[in-house]
Image: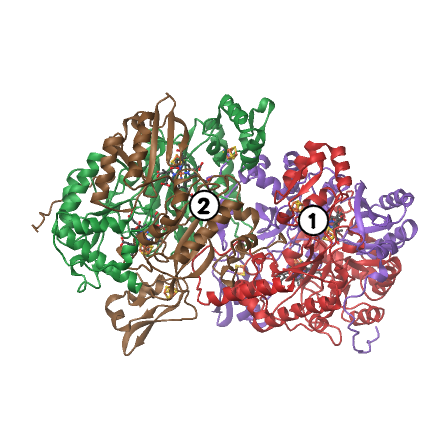
Chain colours: A red, B green, C brown, D purple
Amino acid sequence: MADIKKYPTPMLDVLEDGPWPSFISGFKNLRDNHPDERINNVINGLMGQLEHSYETKMGYWKGGTISVFGYGGGIIPRFSEVGDQFPESREFHTLRVQPTPGNYYTTDMMRKLADSWEKWGSGLQTFHGQTGNIMFIGADNDSFQHFFDEINDYGWDLGGAGPCVRTAMSCVGGARCEMSNCNEHAIHRHLVNSFTDDVHRPALPYKFKFKVSGCPNDCQNAIERADFAVIGTWRDHKKVDQDAWKAFVADKGVDYVMDNVISRCTSKSLALGEDNALVCDESNCVRSMHCMNVVPKAISPGDDKGVTILCGGKRTLKIGDLMGTVLIPFMKLETPEDYEAIVELAEEMVDFWAENGLEHERTGEMIERIGLVNYLEGIGIDPDPNMIAQPRNVSYVRTDGWDEAAEEWFNRKREEKAAS
Amino acid sequence: MADIKKYPTPMLDVLEDGPWPSFISGFKNLRDNHPDERINNVINGLMGQLEHSYETKMGYWKGGTISVFGYGGGIIPRFSEVGDQFPESREFHTLRVQPTPGNYYTTDMMRKLADSWEKWGSGLQTFHGQTGNIMFIGADNDSFQHFFDEINDYGWDLGGAGPCVRTAMSCVGGARCEMSNCNEHAIHRHLVNSFTDDVHRPALPYKFKFKVSGCPNDCQNAIERADFAVIGTWRDHKKVDQDAWKAFVADKGVDYVMDNVISRCTSKSLALGEDNALVCDESNCVRSMHCMNVVPKAISPGDDKGVTILCGGKRTLKIGDLMGTVLIPFMKLETPEDYEAIVELAEEMVDFWAENGLEHERTGEMIERIGLVNYLEGIGIDPDPNMIAQPRNVSYVRTDGWDEAAEEWFNRKREEKAAS
Amino acid sequence: MSKPEMREPIESGCPDGFQYMHPTMRRNFGLWDYHEDPQPGVMVHVAKNGDKIWTVKAGTQRILDVFTLRTLMDIADEFADGYIRFTIRSNIEFYVDAEEKLQPLVDAIKDKGFAVGGTRNSVASISHTQGWLHCDIPGTDASGVVKAMMDELYDEFTNWNMPNRVHITTSCCQINCGGQGDIAINVQHTKPPKIDHSLVGNVCERPSVVARCPVAAIRPAMVDGQPSLEVDEKKCICCGACYPPCPPMQINDHEFTQLAVWIGGNHSNARGKPTFQRLVAAGIPNNPPRWPEATAIVKKILDCYKEGARDWERINEWVERIGWPRFFEVTGLPFTKYHIDNWRGARANLNSSTHIRF
Amino acid sequence: MSKPEMREPIESGCPDGFQYMHPTMRRNFGLWDYHEDPQPGVMVHVAKNGDKIWTVKAGTQRILDVFTLRTLMDIADEFADGYIRFTIRSNIEFYVDAEEKLQPLVDAIKDKGFAVGGTRNSVASISHTQGWLHCDIPGTDASGVVKAMMDELYDEFTNWNMPNRVHITTSCCQINCGGQGDIAINVQHTKPPKIDHSLVGNVCERPSVVARCPVAAIRPAMVDGQPSLEVDEKKCICCGACYPPCPPMQINDHEFTQLAVWIGGNHSNARGKPTFQRLVAAGIPNNPPRWPEATAIVKKILDCYKEGARDWERINEWVERIGWPRFFEVTGLPFTKYHIDNWRGARANLNSSTHIRF
Ligand code: SRM
Ligand code: SRM
Ligand code: SRM
Ligand code: SRM
Ligand code: SF4
Ligand code: SF4
Ligand code: SF4
Ligand code: SF4
Ligand code: SF4
Ligand code: SF4
Ligand code: SF4
Ligand code: SF4
């Protein structure tokens, strides 16, 4: 531990109070108690600059261009604009490292990562950033390559930054959740690892994000913020354990059950039958999860599991926030061929967008510009009524070609019927 | 009855079959049996041209410019493009005549109108066109002024055509409907008759329509197609005659009542209480009419009646159909001052639009272009949360001036409180 | 014909209706208590003081000749009290103030060949527009379409077979003066306008027709050395908006001007908020004098609605409950790329959720 | 420091997680039956074969120093089974496969100063972003805002007081990497960027910054004879989108960069379809180190929600049931012209009905 001149941090100090764990206490611990002087100094400089930000209400980092050998992205470079005042943390880059799907770690692996990071970096990290990366915050120009080489050796790789395929995210899913309808982990890895080149060498119009949630609860906010959202679902009837259900009714009482389950079903497709059995109009269930969220012990997803795929979700820039919209109402994901099919779909989507997207234009914005139908035609997907909330409601549409389109629909329906 | 050479009409003849009253039979009756040869001929020509349209699937009228002395609009002039083939109906103009609010007539008045029209015109008329005018269809260049003079003498005036204030419409309302919350007739006349100059001398950016419905059932489709929609409503609690209600429950049974009334209430604000009494959460009723539509004998609008005013409804041209949106959540309409106030509001709206609307731009399209807030400021109306379905959901907004706006809100609330 | 003397108009505007109102209605204005529906087409409204008025609603051809008009007045004079009104859908209403006058009135109306009905959960008469009979831009007829369809829907007008009111509308060009309805039968052009360049110079306000196009597909251009217009045929959505201000931009075509059916335009605030119509079928031949293809689709939709909807559900509410995919399934109508919105704000019409019925 | 040898990276991508997964979870992957919630922060998931796994969720500072990280690992080694994961909201989860290990684990976590909670109907820990600590465009801090607020919401994290889950998010500029939440505390700039013209020439890709502006308010311009940019201040919506590609367009300001609160961003498909956040309060001072004004508004909204909502209603569902006017009434927040949408498709956010609560 070095005996250093500490920048005063009266405003930051206030953030040591209160019951919630304090990042400032953590910083101070590193500054004051870490055996490595380099770390003491870096954190001292960082705290000095942060205090300066708190006082002036302004930020003082600027970007730049940095990357490990062989890659074009994966690091967010930061250089201080007030480096002369706080030289110790003048360079303070963040490495984005892809975690496992669902973010699993053993303590051993954690310690190993901590050891490497304290050897080369600032000793600060985040599990995880909002895109899902482990963020190792605070490497300098000399150290980031070493750190990368070291962890890369034992199995870790950089995630995305810049106009590229980004690190993916998936929920805890099948590992610990009874709602799961798919192997989130396998989907996550199949998808993102088919694009490693596009992750590491930014050359797309803009970013492209995959997110996987095992059920419509969408614990990954995938619909809201993924260009490619995979959501587990089921196609047959949900499963009801009537004994467990009746026990629930007996326990909570009919009024509670009416108020909290029956009358709250999204599609009004539930009823209490004879003996308080649960009666379900399965043709009308929209898989809105509510009933099983309330009574997981009695109600579960069906057996014919698969996924719904939505496209085009993202946040505000530059036409306003966009939710993803349904692209594939249902897809089985069991056999290797199924997995190939989803990867091919993703490739079609990325390729079409790479060719047709404007600079800095996300998939959703492109769809907004060209219309969903042109996108569907571009990637070879047939229109399906599940893609829409409702048909168009303004008569400004050109319908020459209607007869052919109708014919195609009838042919498809005939084929589906023949196939089943 | 003239002995004329009739154009063959094999396609039209088919429209004499079937149970619904046939306009073609009516035409033929005029052609064949009307004592005035002029009418026989005109209708013969008209039928000839119409048959030609049926055969070729094309229309053959073109417009022009015509108006009665002193006015600039109110007539839709029509000249035949196939006048050489069907010379008898070469000129075939329609006079738009304003009916009474709610469209009341005595048989005497009807006969009088029919007499005048058969004296000067074709003997064909419509009660009413979609904007609400009586349409006297088929005058020629020589006769329209005579016809107008004659009916104008006994109380009828032209309606609008062209870029002007149009003929208004109002529902049967108080005259025969228990749902009525306002004097639709008085509102209708106060509004449109304050703009007679603007009705008769088209000089506005485009058309402007008033429509009045006495309750939210909106039997005039006012929200969908009026620039200025007045809809009767009430501000206090709706009235429930519990005896009549219980009689209804006894008659129909609880299941029927649950399925058709209680569970169908828009805001879920109804319940069946003790003794099957109707329990209403009045703070949550959105005046969606359903309960009283089903049980008019037991449930009625409240006593503190007035109107909601919406603005900007219209059909497709040129940005797509627009529903009107709330401008004045509630306005009393009882005293002469109240009526003055609504007329002043309409004047403000027409004036602001006359100054700021582009050519061929309706109020709703202008609002779409400049934003509702600019429109409110232009006509001097304070923002109100009832104007919105929800607050904005994209962060692209400039909020300097927030503090002043907040202050204004608090001041208004204080004043309202002091006033009440 | 004599020249009219040019006198100033009396700008009386909208006349007072109270002078023409049935005395029972005038007396009880704003004082009605409730109503009942004794039979299709007949209502009785009861005033707070106990007064009653029976209304009988009759469907007519909207475009009336004076003979038919006088027949209706004769009925009103003989069997009703000499007062009538017309509804927004151009139906005529007769009134009587005593129950014993009711049945004779109903019988007289039917006797003269008019349809009694259109109240409550029936198919109201179809609202219509001018069409080939009078308008300068129509793609089809109006009176004819309506007559042909109402012949087929006659029983639905005179009976209470439907889950709730059905309001049908027609329009004769894409301007759609006829409004939106539970079912709307509208014109849909499918080819860009053909320009008669020889006429453009004289007839068109060129800047304003350019401004009128909703997709900016029209450009001023020189054709054969004359100022004219040209249309970017790829952009053009065939809406016909350019035709009224510039008739040489011929949009109407005997083959490519077709019909389309839209459903779910429900403009009351009853239960839900007012809704727009939505496209369900296009490419329907414009086939006078009876338009059988369009009528068949309308009837199919009505059959499915009658079969599937709950009481009080309007068509839009029924479809929203069962979901659009099922609507296409039960009606057998094809779902195509044309149903997927691409107009402004199209995204709001896409499914941004996993709510799906399988 | 030694120069690294330049070796080719091993493009291993996303690693396999099964190797790091608790054996009970690995064994029962996809075979879980149901779960129960014994206490706040603790869940037990029961597999179809009867296996059980207890999860204990702990809130931490998201930005972890290696000491704190090792403390957490020590807990996991001593009291849990040596396996952990992090949630999407950066909470750490510990696992035990036997009930008797549960309480000691919970106690140890609390003992070391971490918060146990955030499950079910509690306020989950606030998701956050980089802020002044690392980003190049932040208008505020992130870790600090969250620490300050979580101190105040501590009891709401550790208890089940809320009608349903509450997901709060923060973001440190208008790009909003932090997402939307039931409550979102976002930066809102209120003045157009001030341009440092001397730097524009060197630093900015001028065409691409012009293209980035969502309202086309930026024009290339010559200033003092040098190529620079100018902003149409009337058009500018102060979004700051121009700042990342062109830092001389200074959008951040110590006074005019403020906070705004948005509510009702509910992205699950549970019951309703996913919804966007909606603006409720702006003009909130950006006031480090504790941002009391923002926190007060968040707490007020939570109080009203707790008071007014039914079980299972998320914040958006509660407000949709009572109506927006009542939301402003109960929270006492002012309703202003800024709440009325004027972005693309604004009309969908207006009230096109007479559905009004008085
Ligand atoms: C007479 C008329 C008003 C007028 O001034 O002309 C009228 C009159 C009544 N309407 Fe209407 N409505 C009339 C057109 C409309 C329209 C407009 C339209 O037809 O285009 C609408 C709204 C637009 C729409 O449908 O989208 C309309 C939406 C309603 C509703 C709401 C229906 C719903 O559930 O959505 C009710 C309430 C009900 O049905 O119980 C209603 C109820 C009524 C009642 C029962 C009100 C009453 O208590 O007296 C009236 C008798 C109706 C009847 O004839 O069956 N009226 N009603 C119109 C008759 C048209 C016709 O000849 O068929
Ligand atoms: C006659 C009528 C149809 C009918 O048979 O009932 C009609 C007929 C015409 N309408 Fe209409 N509109 C008629 C009610 C409507 C309505 C319904 C309403 O007023 O409630 C609408 C939709 C509501 C609205 O205002 O948006 C309507 C929306 C239009 C439009 C599109 C306006 C828009 O802003 O979207 C046009 C085109 C234009 O004005 O440029 C139009 C234009 C026309 C013109 C003048 C076509 C033209 O440019 O030459 C038609 C003259 C036909 C003729 O030969 O008489 N008509 N028109 C209706 C007027 C009769 C009357 O005065 O009572
Ligand atoms: C662990 C986690 C997934 C992960 O892979 O990291 C997760 C896990 C579970 N979620 Fe979640 N959700 C998690 C973030 C989310 C998110 C995203 C977020 O927080 O930003 C959402 C959706 C976005 C949103 O809220 O708008 C989310 C929406 C739900 C819902 C739907 C809630 C609703 O009513 O709208 C449920 C169902 C429920 O609450 O019954 C749910 C239920 C669950 C259950 C109970 C599922 C189960 O049966 O095991 C899991 C335990 C939750 C817990 O910790 O209380 N989870 N859940 C996330 C915990 C975050 C945290 O640390 O607080
Ligand atoms: C680090 C992180 C915030 C955090 O602390 O968690 C972050 C930080 C930045 N984001 Fe982000 N974004 C982060 C997740 C997100 C998310 C959430 C997500 O991925 O689910 C979003 C919203 C979802 C989406 O993609 O729309 C997000 C939407 C943006 C955008 C706007 C993108 C858009 O199309 O609307 C930008 C601006 C841009 O790319 O030009 C942006 C840009 C940035 C930049 C690179 C700012 C810049 O231009 O220099 C920030 C670098 C900060 C830094 O110093 O590290 N960041 N950003 C998150 C990434 C960590 C990680 O890799 O795990
Ligand atoms: S998204 Fe569904 S499967 Fe995944 S963790 Fe959440 S509830 Fe479980
Ligand atoms: S999953 Fe949703 S829609 Fe289906 S029954 Fe349960 S609550 Fe209803
Ligand atoms: S709008 Fe209301 S008041 Fe007017 S006729 Fe219809 S139901 Fe009666
Ligand atoms: S008027 Fe509508 S919202 Fe009010 S109680 Fe009746 S059905 Fe419910
Ligand atoms: S719909 Fe078109 S064709 Fe028919 S009357 Fe209106 S403007 Fe004329
Ligand atoms: S038909 Fe419509 S889209 Fe085509 S050129 Fe004319 S106005 Fe434009
Ligand atoms: S929200 Fe803005 S300031 Fe914060 S990390 Fe994202 S880009 Fe940076
Ligand atoms: S702040 Fe936003 S609106 Fe203003 S100039 Fe920059 S990008 Fe354009």
The circle drawn on residue C266 is: 2
Q: Would residue A130 appear left or right of C28 to someone viewing this image?
A: right
Crowd band around label 1 with a 10 angstrom C-alpha radius: few (<14), some (14–19), many (20+)? many
Residue type at numbered disc 1: Val
Q: What residue do we see at 59% from left, 69% from top?
A: A380
What is the x, y in percent for residue C178?
A: 36, 50
Quadrant in the picture for the C terminus of chain C: bottom right
What is the x, y in percent for residue A313?
A: 61, 59
Q: How many marks?
A: 2
What is the x, y in percent for residue C284?
A: 42, 60
Same chain, labels 1 and 2: no
Residue B69 seen in this snapshot: no
| Quadrant position of residue A154 | bottom right
Badge 2: chain ID: C
Q: What's the distance in space between the residues labelled 1 and 2, CA to CA?
A: 48 Å
What is the x, y in percent for residue A276?
A: 71, 35
SS class, disc 2: loop
Q: Nearer the viewer, residue A405 or D110?
A: A405
- For ligand 9, give the image quadrant: bottom left
Badge 1: chain ID: D
| Quadrant position of residue B11 | bottom left
Residue type at numbered disc 2: Asn
Q: Would residue C8 appear left or right of B234 to someone viewing this image?
A: left
Query: As displayed, is residue D1 above or below residue A29?
Result: below
SS class, disc 1: helix
The circle drawn on residue D145 is: 1
Query: As displayed, is residue C123 above or below residue A89?
Result: above
Mark 2 CB near ligand 1 (8 Å cut): yes
